[in-house]
Image (tube, rainbow, N blue to C red):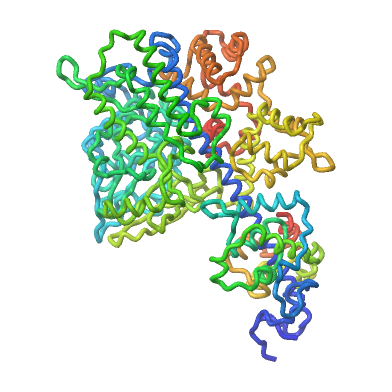
């Protein structure tokens, strides 16, 4: 059986793990449909972070589309790239660099991501990594993990993989994946 | 269900495993991306912390100058208070060149047999210069005899150079340009290692700020000067704002020299003072690329800069000297202190107090510095009024006391206008920073020079037929940064400047095509061993520690501000109120809410903050301070860097000691200016506590040490925080075992 070389044309449910209820097969993200449930305190927190990302010369409280994902992540969520693109309205590469959004536009996007269920627990992680544990001894080969991260899913670049795995492998090139997961989740 | 893309057989045979693998991969990737974003955010606000405190420290330097000016204004010339400080505004000796040569003579200095460092013979050869680099790499120290000799030769050479060096590239020669080094020898060695040492084929331009903050400033200078002597056409040095003896008092170079050269340090410093004033101001490459330390303003005029007498500008904090002729017709250097009375107050004020347009970067104003200088008013009218009032009262006072002084002839006012204009040109060149908006506004963050915009750059480049400005002066995370449509390049060569892992350094190579080619690096073997996460974490911890100290130093102001939000005196405030109070007092423009988790641990269950408890958390303990008045202690802590600078100024012979009497007087002056009431008794207690051996002299270092008010254990953390600000500039040197 010849392996087909493709990546994302999986049915939507399989790729990003939780399908959100508001997201049918051909979704357009509609900010107006999102009810904001944040507390005023939370909103103030988000403003702080938003300001930190604001690079406009006159502090207009605007960030680029490209920064949106980083900001959401910095605030503690861990969406996939696909989810980010979705809330941004599937922008082009050019849009990502040039289009801006202000705080009010950002909030519903963030809310949407926050509402997504099933962000991945420690156990999910460990289960996932166990797939690569050939010997069933609690370790995976660093090389294999690198390969997987760089070729599957929302692929990582080589230097990103390097940074993630820095100092994680033991002398035999193995990684204790429970410890690894704890490490990643502890940031 | 389709297959995954890996080559692994596993996935062929087990499609469900493929799905799981992909899920696993995506999970990890998601978490990783979150981790990167959070790390980046931490790095960003850590940077922000360091930078805002650094700049407010620099601002404090200028405020110090104004404090000294206040003393000059308000005490009659004969009073002891004024005499205490006045020497900083005048040279005690009025000397001829011949007398200077005698003072700097090294010939009587003997080099003992046990000396294991390099011996220099002049004229210097390239082998000796290379040997010097090696010796410093081996942690040797050059003997003071050779230091003086080398400096004298350098002085002679520099005097022959023009204000603006004009050099060219050619096919066999690329020019390498380096930015701020700030005493970080490791970075210079790294540059030489990667790029090669200066030679006939390898020209270098060093763009200022060679000294201060790092611990090997003198070694860097000696290396650069040695190569300058060996290859005068291929090594070029531009002056930076830290090539300034008063700035050095505060930022560590003076102390470094006095510590390393206990016997001859003072002479070395004096000679360096002259050398700094003789350093060229800028370099132009192929008539197209301008290299200077700070930047430009809307009035920068290269032909004026080329013409002026650059050595008149000894320090940014001293007005220009003027050449007088003595009765014997021999020209001598003297300060125009004698003419001070009539109009220099006004002139001096004018050189530092620009009218402030609306929309200043108020986020950098540090309120505590307003203690020193509530005279620096926020708007133009008040400013001018103050100047008018001041010069009026001063002149009135002077007229009373110094009637015998001859009035200045009218030509002097012309000279003084020129001097003023030239002064501003040099100041702008050494202290300015680029900004993103158009226009040109005074740089209150630094306290000197201006912020200039892209339109100013365009105009300037067109007027002078140039295509690029290369400058330094600002630390950049990647070691360099383009701005103004790639017409301005900032270059910073001191890596790990704020702390280990904080930033890279960079240098630039320029060939005949004049396209800048940037090379980045990061010194210190320690960095390589740290993961990104660890080095961000470490820098972050440093920054937070400094921030906590700053917060503690403002305890009284913060508590009174909290009380205004706590009308029922519960001792609690909400998070929102906490954040706004802290910003309103500290004026650092930081994301306080985001930082709260690291700054505040005492919260009640409903999220309110117990501010009294918070200060207990932050509290800094110092030995032997129980008998010292709390307010005095806080003032001392808040202004410690300035206090130390003042003491070093008062210590006229750079001995490291001041008398108890001078100490008392200095405190009295400070307390008047700060409008704080310190009783004589409180000051006496302070003095007695630190005059440990009861000999009537206070060791400045011991004094600062006794009141450093930091946890001893955190000082020992590596010991080499490069952070330079109002709080930890002392810890930087103290922790280093080599000093």
Percent position of residue B155, x then y: 26, 32
The answer to whether one can see residue B259 in this image is no
Q: Residue B184 appears in which quarter of the rendering?
A: top left
Is B340 positioned to the left or the right of A139 in the image? left
Residue B433 in view in this figure: yes
Residue occupying the point 25% across, 38% down:
B124
Question: How far across and how far down the image is residue B132, in percent?
Answer: 35, 39
Who is closer to the viewer here, A98 or A160? A98
Number of marks present in the image shown: 0
Q: Which residue is found at the position 19% from the left and 17% from the top?
A: B326
Residue A11, placed above or below residue B128: below
Quarter holding the N terminus of chain B is bottom right
Quarter of the image where one finds residue A80: bottom right
Please state the horizontal and vertical placement of residue B563, each as a whole percent of the image. Answer: 74, 30
The answer to which of B286 and A4 lies nearer the viewer is B286
> Is residue A186 shown above or below B652?
below
- Taking A48 as reference, is B500 left or right? left
Looking at the picture, does residue A92 appear above or below residue B649? below
Residue in the foreground of this view, choosing between B39 and B139: B39
Residue B333 drawn at (x, y percent): 25, 22
């Amino acid at each position: 059986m010849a392996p087909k070389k493709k990546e994302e044309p999986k049915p939507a449910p399989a790729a990003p793990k939780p399908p959100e209820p508001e997201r049918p097969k051909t979704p357009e993200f509609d900010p107006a449909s999102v009810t904001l449930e944040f507390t005023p305190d939370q909103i103030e927190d988000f403003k702080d972070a938003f300001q930190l990302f604001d690079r406009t010369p006159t502090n207009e409280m605007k960030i680029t589309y490209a920064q949106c994902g980083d900001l959401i992540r910095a605030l503690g969520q861990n969406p996939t790239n696909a989810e980010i693109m979705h809330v941004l309205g599937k922008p082009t590469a050019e849009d990502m660099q040039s289009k801006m959004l202000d705080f009010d536009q950002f909030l519903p996007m963030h809310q949407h991501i926050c509402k997504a269920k099933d962000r991945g627990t420690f156990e999910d992680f460990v289960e996932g990594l166990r797939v690569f544990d050939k010997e069933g001894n609690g370790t995976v080969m660093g090389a294999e993990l690198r390969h997987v991260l760089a070729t599957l899913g929302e692929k990582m670049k080589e230097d990103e993989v390097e940074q993630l795995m820095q100092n994680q492998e033991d002398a035999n090139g193995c990684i204790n994946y429970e410890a690894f997961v704890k490490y990643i989740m502890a940031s | 269900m389709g297959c995954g893309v890996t080559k692994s057989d596993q996935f062929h045979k087990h499609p469900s495993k493929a799905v799981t693998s992909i899920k696993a991969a995506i999970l990890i990737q998601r978490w990783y991306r979150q981790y990167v974003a959070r790390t980046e955010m931490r790095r960003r606000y850590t940077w922000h912390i360091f930078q805002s405190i650094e700049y407010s420290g620099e601002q404090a330097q200028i405020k110090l100058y104004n404090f000294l000016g206040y003393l000059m204004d308000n005490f009659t010339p004969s009073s002891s208070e004024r005499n205490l400080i006045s020497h900083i505004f005048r040279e005690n000796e009025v000397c001829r060149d011949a007398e200077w040569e005698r003072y700097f003579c090294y010939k009587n200095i003997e080099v003992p047999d046990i000396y294991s460092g390099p011996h220099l013979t002049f004229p210097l050869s390239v082998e000796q210069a290379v040997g010097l680099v090696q010796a410093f790499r081996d942690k040797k120290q050059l003997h003071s005899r050779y230091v003086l000799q080398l400096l004298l030769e350098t002085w002679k050479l520099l005097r022959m150079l023009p204000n603006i060096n004009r050099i060219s590239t050619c096919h066999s020669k690329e020019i390498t340009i380096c930015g701020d080094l700030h005493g970080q020898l490791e970075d210079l060695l790294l540059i030489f290692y990667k790029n090669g040492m200066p030679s006939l084929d390898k020209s270098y331009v060093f763009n200022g700020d060679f000294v201060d903050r790092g611990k090997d400033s003198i070694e860097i200078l000696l290396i650069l000067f040695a190569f300058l002597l060996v290859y005068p056409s291929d090594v070029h040095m531009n002056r930076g704002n830290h090539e300034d003896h008063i700035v050095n008092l505060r930022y560590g170079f003076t102390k470094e020299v006095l510590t390393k050269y206990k016997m001859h340090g003072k002479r070395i410093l004096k000679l360096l003072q002259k050398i700094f004033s003789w350093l060229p101001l800028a370099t132009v490459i192929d008539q197209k690329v301008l290299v200077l330390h700070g930047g430009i303003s809307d009035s920068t005029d290269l032909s004026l800069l080329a013409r002026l007498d650059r050595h008149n500008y000894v320090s940014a904090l001293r007005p220009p000297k003027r050449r007088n002729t003595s009765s014997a017709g021999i020209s001598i250097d003297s300060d125009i202190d004698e003419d001070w009375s009539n109009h220099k107050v006004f002139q001096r004020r004018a050189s530092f107090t620009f009218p402030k347009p609306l929309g200043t970067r108020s986020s950098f104003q540090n309120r505590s510095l307003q203690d020193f200088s509530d005279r620096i008013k926020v708007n133009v009218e008040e400013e001018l009024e103050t100047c008018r009032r001041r010069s009026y009262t001063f002149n009135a006072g002077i007229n009373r006391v110094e009637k015998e002084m001859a009035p200045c002839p009218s030509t002097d006012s012309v000279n003084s206008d020129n001097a003023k204009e030239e002064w501003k040109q040099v100041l702008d060149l050494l202290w300015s920073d680029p900004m993103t908006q158009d226009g040109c506004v005074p740089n209150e963050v630094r306290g000197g020079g201006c912020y200039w915009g892209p339109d100013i750059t365009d105009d300037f480049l067109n007027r002078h037929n140039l295509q690029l400005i290369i400058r330094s002066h600002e630390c950049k995370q990647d070691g360099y940064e383009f701005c103004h449509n790639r017409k301005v390049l900032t270059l910073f060569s001191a890596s790990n400047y704020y702390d280990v892992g904080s930033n890279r350094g960079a240098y630039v190579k320029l060939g005949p095509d004049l396209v800048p080619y940037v090379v980045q690096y990061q010194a210190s073997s320690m960095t390589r061993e740290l993961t990104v996460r660890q080095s961000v974490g470490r820098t972050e911890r440093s920054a937070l520690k400094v921030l906590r100290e700053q917060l503690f130093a403002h305890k009284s102001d913060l508590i009174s501000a909290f009380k205004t939000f706590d009308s029922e005196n519960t001792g609690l405030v909400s998070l929102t109120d906490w954040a706004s109070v802290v910003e309103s007092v500290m004026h650092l423009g930081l994301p306080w809410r985001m930082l709260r988790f690291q700054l505040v641990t005492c919260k009640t269950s409903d999220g309110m903050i117990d501010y009294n408890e918070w200060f207990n958390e932050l509290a800094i303990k110092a030995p032997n301070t129980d008998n010292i008045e709390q307010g005095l202690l806080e003032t001392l802590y808040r202004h410690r860097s300035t206090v130390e600078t003042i003491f070093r100024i008062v210590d006229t012979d750079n001995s490291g000691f001041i008398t108890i009497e001078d100490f008392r007087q200095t405190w009295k002056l400070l307390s008047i200016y700060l409008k704080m009431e310190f009783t004589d008794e409180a000051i006496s207690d302070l003095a007695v506590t630190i005059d440990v051996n009861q000999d009537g002299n206070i060791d400045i270092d011991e004094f600062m040490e006794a009141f450093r008010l930091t946890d001893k254990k955190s000082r020992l953390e590596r010991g080499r925080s490069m952070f330079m600000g109002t709080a930890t500039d002392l810890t930087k040197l103290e922790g280093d075992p080599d000093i």
